Image (cartoon, rainbow, N blue to C red):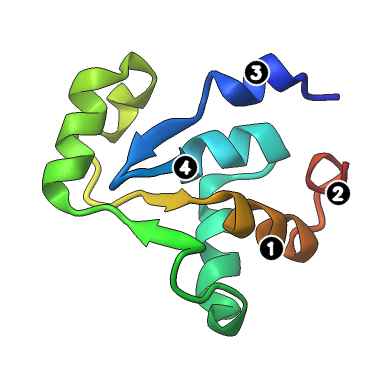
């Protein structure tokens, strides 16, 4: 079971909202980041405005510079997504992961 401190340590503030980046969500839910992004792409109606934020290149670069855990994103061409609390709940209903259901 994921403890509350582990989740709280992954929350960042972006555009005035508390969010968790897709790579962290994937780790917490026990799935690959590509599965997270595929779920969003395949279910756009379940992620209205305010559920998921697409970072821009500047935000991605600031993320990499500020948080060492995102160093693997430094040379990646993909742009991360950030999930609000509502987005996390919706994602958990779509994923088949036992941790997401938990």
Separation (CA) of disc 2 from disc 1: 11 Å
Separation (CA) of disc 4 from disc 2: 19 Å
Q: Is mark 3 on a helix, strand or loop?
A: helix
Image x and y of residue 91, in percent = 67, 59
- Residue at position x 28%, y 47% from top? 15
Image x and y of residue 63, in percent = 25, 31
Residue 61: mark: none
* Image depth: mark 2 or mark 1 in front: 1
Q: N-terminal of the two: label 1 or label 3?
A: 3
Q: Residues within 10 Å of mark 2 (few under 14, many from 20)?
A: few
Image x and y of residue 10, in percent = 51, 26
Instruction: Judge whether 96 appears above or below 12 on screen.
Output: below
Q: N-terminal of the two: label 4 or label 2?
A: 4
Which residue, given by chain and number where applicable, does mark 4 sit on? 19
Quadrant of residue 60 in the image?
top left
Residue 90: mark: 1
Q: How crowded is mark 4: few (under 14 residues within 10 Å), some or many (20 or more)?
A: many
Q: How many marks?
A: 4
Position of the C terminus, as image quadrant, is top right
Separation (CA) of disc 1 from disc 3: 20 Å
Position of the N terminus, as image quadrant, is top right
C-beta proximity under 8 Å, tags 4 and 2:
no
Residue farthest to the bottom, as pictured:
45
**Residue 39 visible in image:** yes
- Residue at position x 47%, y 42% from top? 19
Q: Is mark 1 on a helix, strand or loop?
A: helix
Residue 101: mark: 2
Separation (CA) of disc 3 from disc 2: 17 Å
Q: N-terminal of the two: label 3 or label 2?
A: 3
Which residue, given by chain and number where applicable, does mark 3 sit on? 6
Separation (CA) of disc 3 from disc 4: 14 Å
């Amino acid at each position: 079971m994921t403890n509350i401190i582990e989740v709280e340590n992954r929350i960042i503030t972006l555009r005035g909202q508390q969010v968790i980046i897709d790579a962290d969500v994937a780790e917490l839910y026990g799935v690959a980041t590509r599965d997270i992004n595929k779920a969003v792409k395949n279910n756009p109606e379940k992620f209205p405005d305010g559920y998921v934020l697409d970072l821009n290149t500047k935000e991605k670069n600031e993320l990499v510079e500020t948080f060492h855990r995102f160093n693997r994103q430094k040379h990646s061409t993909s742009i991360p997504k950030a999930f609000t609390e509502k987005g996390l709940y919706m994602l958990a209903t779509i994923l088949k992961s036992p941790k997401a259901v938990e």
